[in-house]
Image: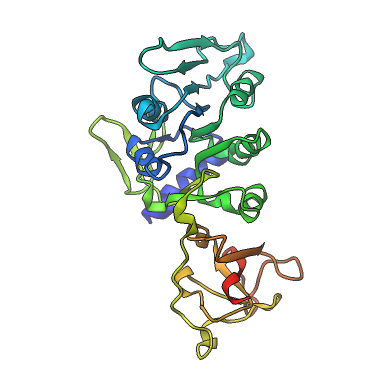
Amino acid sequence: MARQATNKLLQKAKKSKSDEFYTQLCDIESELQYYPNCFINKVVYCNCDDPQVSNFFRYFRDNFQRLGLRKLIASCYREVENNLQANQNAYYCEYEGDNIPMHITQFAGNGDFRSTECIALLQQADVVVTNPPFSLFREFVTQIVHYNKQFLVIGNVNAITYKEIFDLIQKNKAWLGVNLGRGISGFIVPEHYDLYGTEVRINENGQRIISTNGCLWLTNLELNLRHKDIDLVKEYIGNEDKYPKYDNYDGINVNRTQDIPRDYAGLMGVPITFLHKYNPDQFEIVRFRKGDDDKDLRINGKCPYFRILIKNKRNI
């Protein structure tokens, strides 16, 4: 019930466009440790982050020298109420190390990442690292890709099912980061948010934390772990009854990544969580979700939850 409740809150936020879920420093540190050489002499842009409260800004500022950054930029959004004059509290800051004064500039507009002002900052950057609004995730990633930027961002795990995101993964232009689900310990939410379920807490700083196993990191930063083979221990021959064939596609269904058979050369439908272990050197992603009739894959008339059709390159 707790899992359903916390995921329900994230889905409710997406529908209402209440996107104030702030990433904890511990989760940023946990993920960023796997990219030690990806920021050397780079300009990092945190474009959904108020420098006064953002843990992304805090992480990169505190580790500026160790990571070898050239520059850190952070910008924040401020809602303009009643269509009046733009709120001058929207601003961005530029940090180039402790020996250079931090430069703070007010936006003429509201600091939306899609604004002309923020796009101009984006064009200066090499890497974008942030927690973008869940309701605008596909638009956010599409913009970054359009401007040919590297990125590391947090999103809902269902983002994998978006056509724009899946296409990037299939074309090996993006992949999942290291931490997924319960590997992300929770988000800080404002006082006015309702807290659902039992997996909520107040931390030592009085912040309200929602824990969820429904999120992931998405990136195009090189990650050595993604080239590690999945250890296949199951076999298809002799266990055919455990791998039913689809009604509308020439392939077998595999319910769990650890059950992928090592001796099957044809197409296999695996759960979307397979992407967390996906090695592009070991497997080919063929298509997503649909059978030959362009309808969801079916087994005896029933549709399993979203499946990714893959082929083992080692068996070709």
For the C terminus, the quadrant is: bottom right
- The quarter of the picture where residue 151 lies is top right
When the figure is inspected, residue 235 is found, relative to residue 295, above or below; the finding is: below
Q: Is residue 147 left or right of residue 66?
A: right
Residue nearest the observer in this picture, 163 or 1:
163
When the figure is inspected, residue 310 is found, relative to residue 87, above or below; the finding is: below
What residue is at 38 percent from the left and 38 percent from the top?
Answer: 28
Q: Is residue 24 left or right of residue 125?
A: left
What residue is at 36 percent from the left and 48 percent from the top?
Answer: 197
- The quarter of the picture where residue 205 lies is top left
For the N terminus, the quadrant is: bottom left
Q: Is residue 6 left or right of residue 295?
A: left
Residue nearest the observer in this picture, 31 or 15:
31
**How many numbered badges does the structure rendering display?**
0
In the rendered image, is residue 304 in sight? no
Q: Is residue 89 left or right of residue 249?
A: left
**Residue 287: x %, y % from top left:** 67, 63
